[in-house]
Image: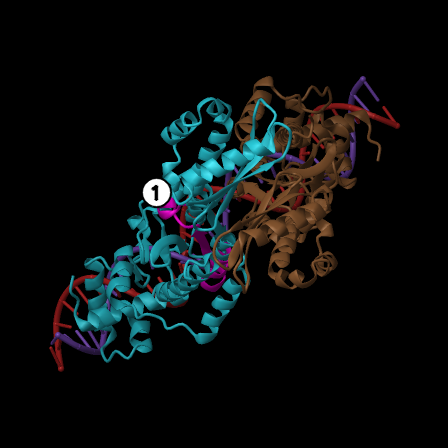
Chain colours: A cyan, B brown, C purple, D red
Amino acid sequence: MKLAQRKQKILAAVIEHYIATGEPIGSKSLQNTEGLEVSSATIRNELADLTVKGFLRQPHTSAGRIPTEYGYRFYVDNLMKPTVLDDRVKRYIENRLLDSSDAPERIIRTASVIASELIGTAALSTTPTGDNTRVHRIKFVQTGRHTSMLVLITSSGMVKSRLFRCDFDITPEMLNVFDRALNERLAGQPLSAVNRPFAQTFAASFGELGLLMPDMLNAVMDACRESLGTNVYTSGSTKLLYQEDFDLISARGVLEFLGDSDSRDKYLNNVPEGTNIYIGKENSHILLKRSAVVATRYEIENQPAGLIAVIGSTRFDYPKAVAILECIAEYTGKFIAELLSVRQ
Amino acid sequence: MKLAQRKQKILAAVIEHYIATGEPIGSKSLQNTEGLEVSSATIRNELADLTVKGFLRQPHTSAGRIPTEYGYRFYVDNLMKPTVLDDRVKRYIENRLLDSSDAPERIIRTASVIASELIGTAALSTTPTGDNTRVHRIKFVQTGRHTSMLVLITSSGMVKSRLFRCDFDITPEMLNVFDRALNERLAGQPLSAVNRPFAQTFAASFGELGLLMPDMLNAVMDACRESLGTNVYTSGSTKLLYQEDFDLISARGVLEFLGDSDSRDKYLNNVPEGTNIYIGKENSHILLKRSAVVATRYEIENQPAGLIAVIGSTRFDYPKAVAILECIAEYTGKFIAELLSVRQ
DNA sequence: GTTAGCACTCTAATGTTGAGAGTGCTAATT
DNA sequence: AATTAGCACTCTCAACATTAGAGTGCTAAC
């Protein structure tokens, strides 16, 4: 859809006024506040047209206009100017993330915290998706006569542990054998390769001894399976309850979305790389139909990895959110990469 | 404060009616619903007296009575009869926890999930407090030329990891030396003993080599310090927004309390063993002054450990909550103990 | 194509009214 | 002395009416 210059200008003015104040705006105020050299009647005509075309709507007959979701979409695609981030803000983001960079999880958790802080709405971040993740190392630690702990370290620096118990006495030698064999066979392999068929052939290759290890292998598979799933950190979700243009029902919807890990993770996995904006009904998840999501994938070594996102009402300062998220994503990816020393 | 039989009966009736329905109740309905063989006028007199004494109050002149916090307190201390849990519910709790018992964290997380489900309000659970926790084992895993990961396993089965980087090339031999020395020195020691003085004497005892390990020792201290802090899992917090007698402000307060880990953990650490009920202003935390908390400490091997708690409005089915929490706490402690095989 | 003018519509705030619930008090009863 | 019946009183809540104000769409003139 093409729009005449003046219509675009008016549309942008309405949307920006609404984003800033949350109030509808009418032809008269629009005439005063903008550098538009036309009368209110002309603006009225334009507004009427923009309304017919679906970009704007009136909450009621005697109110001004506010954007529709379609209007936001047009604004986001064609009208909004990218915000240039203040250097102080950039530095703040960098420092906060640097302070947390002793473990990848902490960086990622901090990313959601500062996103929420700076953008003023609920935020979330996810650990890198499992698809490119590989087994780095598997370690065993004996915890009792019949029990041991298995620690799995993935190529993206995540750690998962599992306890398992055997019916026989565990000896350090036994653990050593398992340890060596497993790491020889699995180090560098994708997590998804650690499945039942693998377990069976692996156990079989051990002959008699293989019969002793089903519990151990179950624990290994279990830990790999869980590592394949993303961890999600949320932060600032109470902020949703303070956004006065966000009705309780929508806020509840988002909170419930954030609380239901299954469908939430499914939704998040479908977000492609780069920065994505989903407005209202564009969201595939039913609980988000009245909200907007801005989500940026961070990259580790140019590989799309996890996600940093904010969720709020559709009345959103989109340019600001995009700028901040992209900055956070950049540093997050960079610091995780440095932490893992993939670089050198 | 002593109360005559009849007053107690009336007070209990008012409170139970209010807990069940959320509506105030007056002298007339009270006369009908209860086996009280007195006229409404008599009940009116009693109600007036209970109101003067501070157990009840009227939302407004022409409404019935509802309990004050003091009334709830009296009810909880003297009037309520312990609920006997249905066997099916007990079995349900046992099975859900059993399904999660491959790692202590999962048991604890599940505990909060089922508490929230069964009691119908926000719930939380914490990992065992650090005071009795000791170092079980420390492991090193090399991740790069200059980087390694340290994995700390505590006596309560919790796992923490830290990445660290050195300015020199790390060799497997070096890690082995650290590994052996550290475990020799630390295994079985309380986490709180792993502090700066320890690090200094430890490094000093290594002579020249000790100069190479400040990063490593920092990571160890860091991991121990973090393990000392409790992890908190919350669940069902959106349910607060659906409790119609819970105003938005109180709900926000609780959500904010749950989101602010520092003051939350401080509050939780002060909860003694056994089952505790805090009603309204009895709560030491300002954000909880309009809410009620029921919290039970579970025990591992007869040692008070972490906490399972529910939070909601002061209109609470206290007997039910107590029964369910105590059942969950019992199984949680039992299963964690079994997992750690402390028993045999 | 743009503008002035005007009748019209709708909201939000305010006030009014009446039904209903529950009370406290007084006087009568047991 | 405790209990009860009766009654006037108070307060809330919902429904309805009124009014000011904001903004519109339309028409006719520029």
Left or right side of A89 for B333: right
Q: Which residues are magenta?
A: A109-134
Is residue B228 visible in the rendered image? The answer is no
Q: Residue at x 19, y 63 (%)?
A: A49
Q: Is residue B45 above or below residue A103?
A: above
The C terminus of chain A lies in quadrant: bottom left
Q: Find out whether residue B1 is within the magenta segment.
A: no
The N terminus of chain A lies in quadrant: bottom left
Left or right side of A9 for A127: right
* Closer to us: B248 or A327: A327
Quick one: label 1, few (<14), some, or many (20+) residues within 10 Å? Answer: few
Q: Find out whether residue A128 is within the magenta segment.
A: yes
Q: Please state the horizontal and vertical placement of residue B326, each as a whole percent of the image.
A: 67, 29
Q: Amino acid at mark 1?
A: Ile
Q: Which of the chains bears the disc numbered 1? A: A
Label 1, on which residue?
A286
